Amino acid sequence: MSQVSIEIQLSTLPDSPGVYQFYDADEKILYVGKAKNLKKRVASYFTKTHEYGKTRVMVKKIRGIRHIVVPTESDALLLENNLIKKYRPRYNVLLKDDKSYPWICIKNERFPRIFPTRKLIKDGSEYYGPYTSMKTVRTLLDLVKSVYPLRTCNYDLSQEKIDSGKYKVCLEYHLGNCKGPCEGLQNAEDYHAQIEDIREIIKGNFKSSLHYFKHRMKSLAVDMQFEEAQLIKEKIEVLENYQVKSTIVNPKINNVDVFSIISDESHAYVNFLQLSHGSIIRSHTLEIKKKLDESDVDLLQLAIVEIRQRFDSRSTELYLPFEVTAEPHLKVTVPKLGDKKKIVDLSERNAKFFRQERFKQIKIIDPDRHTNRIMVQMQKDLRLSAEPRHIECFDNSNIQGSNPVAACVVFRNGKPSKKEYRHYNIKTVDGPDDFASMEEVVYRRYKRLLAEEESLPQLIVIDGGKGQLSSALKSLDILDLRGKIAIIGIAKRLEEIYFPEDPIPLYLDKKSESLKIIQQLRNEAHRFGITFHRNKRSKAAINSELESIDGVGEKTAQNLLKTFKSVKRVKEASLEKLAEIVGMVKAKKIYGTFHP
C-alpha cells in the first residue's frame, strides 16, 4: 500500500458516482461502499463524529483508499454487491450466495421431461426458479402432472428409434399418466403444446390452459363424449382451485418484485415477494447482520440487488416501502393505498413473522444473544445511558388503608431473580397514602444497598404515574442517587411510561419486547405484594377473633395457634386441653365463648 497520507488520498478523489474500498496497514480490505459523490462520501468518514463504536474503530484502521468510477449510482450499487461477495470485507454486511436452491427443469429433449433439480447444466434446457423450498416445487409439479400427461422415462425418443419399434409403453401409459410418445402414440407437436401451457402455469398464468380445456370440454360434450368431458372438467377444477389459492391480489398485477425491510439494533430482515398474474410465485426473507449501523435505505438497496441476482428475477417493476436507487430499467413504485399497498404490507408481515421465528430459535439455541438483543433494545426504547441488566420494580398494596405493605422485585438480564425479592411493612405512614408509602420503601431499599455496598440497579420501575414517580424521586434525592439510577413510572390504564421532569408520557408499541419486560416486572411486583398483603390480613383476622375474647391478648392467641394450628381446632378443643396451654381461668373464658 502506498505511503501517501489519507488527506492526500481524499483530496484526489473525484466528484463522481462509484465504489470505494478501505484497506488497513496489511493491505487487507476493510470495507466496500458505494457513493453518488465519491469525494463527499469518503471524506465524511474522517470529518464526522461517529456515534457507532465499530465505525470509529474501522476509521482508525484505514491506511489506504481505492475507488472505481462508474457511470451511474445504480451501476455503483451492482458493483458494490459483487465486490462484497468477492472479498467479504470485515465491516460489510454478510451476503451469502446460496447455490443449493431447487429449480424446475424442462429438459432439452424432443419430448421434454419436467423434474426438480438443484444442479444447473448448460445443455440448452430451461430452468425456472430458483424456489425457496422443495415443497413449492413439488406442489407445482404435482399440479402439472395432475393436468397434463407427461413422460417420466429417460429414453432417447428420436424419430428413428420410435419408428424402429425399439420401445414399448410402460405402466404409466396404462394408468393414463402418459400418452405413449415412445410408440408414436403422441406426436411431438401435441406434446410441445402441453409444454407451452406448463411454462405459463409455472409463471403463474393459468389463462391459456383454462381457455384450452374449457373449449375442449364443450367440444367433447357436443360430440356426446361425456366421460372424456368429465375428465377435462376435473382438470379445470384442479387448475381453478390452485389459481384461487395462489391469487392473493389483483390478477392485473404482473411481473412485479415486492420488497420490505424490518430492522433492529443488530439485524435487518428483507422480505421478497415475486408476483405474476396476481399470484405469489416466490417468497424469500434475507437476514442481514449489521456491521456499521447501516440505514434501512442502504440495506434495502443492497438486498434488492442481491436477491434479484440470486433468483434471476426479470421483473420490470418494484413495489417498495420507500424510495431507493434502482437500476435504470426498473420502475419503482411506493404505494400509499389500494392493492399495491396491501401487497407491500403483506411483505412486511412476512418479514416480521420471520424475525419472530428467528427470535424464538435464538432464544432456544443462543439464549445469551437473545438476552443481549433485548437489553440493547430496552436501552434504546427507554433512552437509558446503559443496558438495564439489573432492574428493580416497586408496588404498594393496601385495602382501605389496612395492613399497608410494599413489594420490590428484581430482574437480572430480563429474567426474575426471585431470591432477591423483598417485602416491606409500611412503618412511617398512617392510612392509605400510596405516595408516602412509595417514598418510604424506596428510601429504605437503597439506603440499605448503599450501607451494605451492594450493586445498584441500572433501572428502577415504579408501578404508578407521575405522583408515585415523584415520591420515589424524593428518596433518591435524599440519598444523592438522582441521575445515578434511571427511573421510570408505568401507569396501568394506557401503559404510559413516565420519565422524571417530562410531563409527556412515552407510549411503546404494544408488541414491543421492552414493554413486555416492563409489564412482566409490574405484574410480578403486584402478585408478590398482594400475596404478602393477603397473608398478613388473614393472619390479622385470625388473631383478632381470638383477641376479642376477654382476657386473651396477642401472646395468648399466638400460643393457642402454635399448639392447635387453627382457630377451628381451638373451638373444638376440650376445657382440659385449653387449660394445659393457658391455665384454667382463661380456658373457661375461651371455652365459654365457643360453647355458650
Image (cartoon, grey):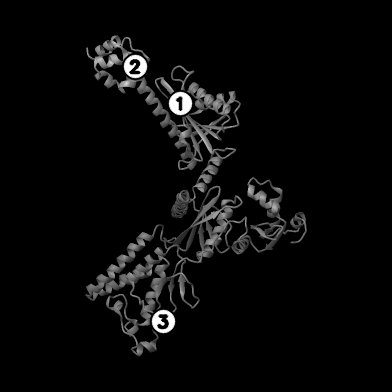
- Note whether 554 is above or below 464 in the view shown: above
Query: Is disc 3 placed on a helix, strand or loop?
Result: loop
Q: Considering depth in this image, is 561 or 469 the residue closer to the camera?
A: 561
Q: Which mark is residue 557?
A: 2
The residue singled out by tag 1 in the image is 406
Query: Can the viewer see residue 581?
Result: yes
Judge from the rendering whether residue 197 lies leftward or rightward of residue 367; answer left or right. left
Q: Position of residue 81 (x, y in %)?
A: 59, 61
Query: Is disc 2 placed on a helix, strand or loop?
Result: helix
Q: Position of residue 372 (x, y in %)?
A: 53, 45
Q: Where's the N terminus, which quadrant?
A: bottom right
Query: Is disc 1 placed on a helix, strand or loop?
Result: strand
Q: Position of residue 125 (x, y in %)?
A: 46, 76
- Note whether 288 is above or below 566 in the view shown: below
Q: Where's the C terminus, which quadrant?
A: top left
What kind of residue is marked 1? Ala
Q: Mark 3 near mark 2, Cβ–Cβ under 8 Å?
A: no
Q: Residue at x 53, y 46 (%)?
A: 373
Query: Can the viewer see residue 314?
Result: no
Q: Considering depth in this image, is 294 or 304 the residue closer to the camera?
A: 294
The residue singled out by tag 3 in the image is 110
Q: Considering depth in this image, is 16 or 503 the residue closer to the camera?
A: 503
The quadrant where residue 483 appears: top right
Residue lying at the far bottom in this picture: please name it.
Answer: 164
Nearer the observer: mark 3 or 2; the answer is 2
Q: Residues within 10 Å of mark 3 (few under 14, many from 20)?
A: some
Q: Residue at x 29, y 20 (%)?
A: 567
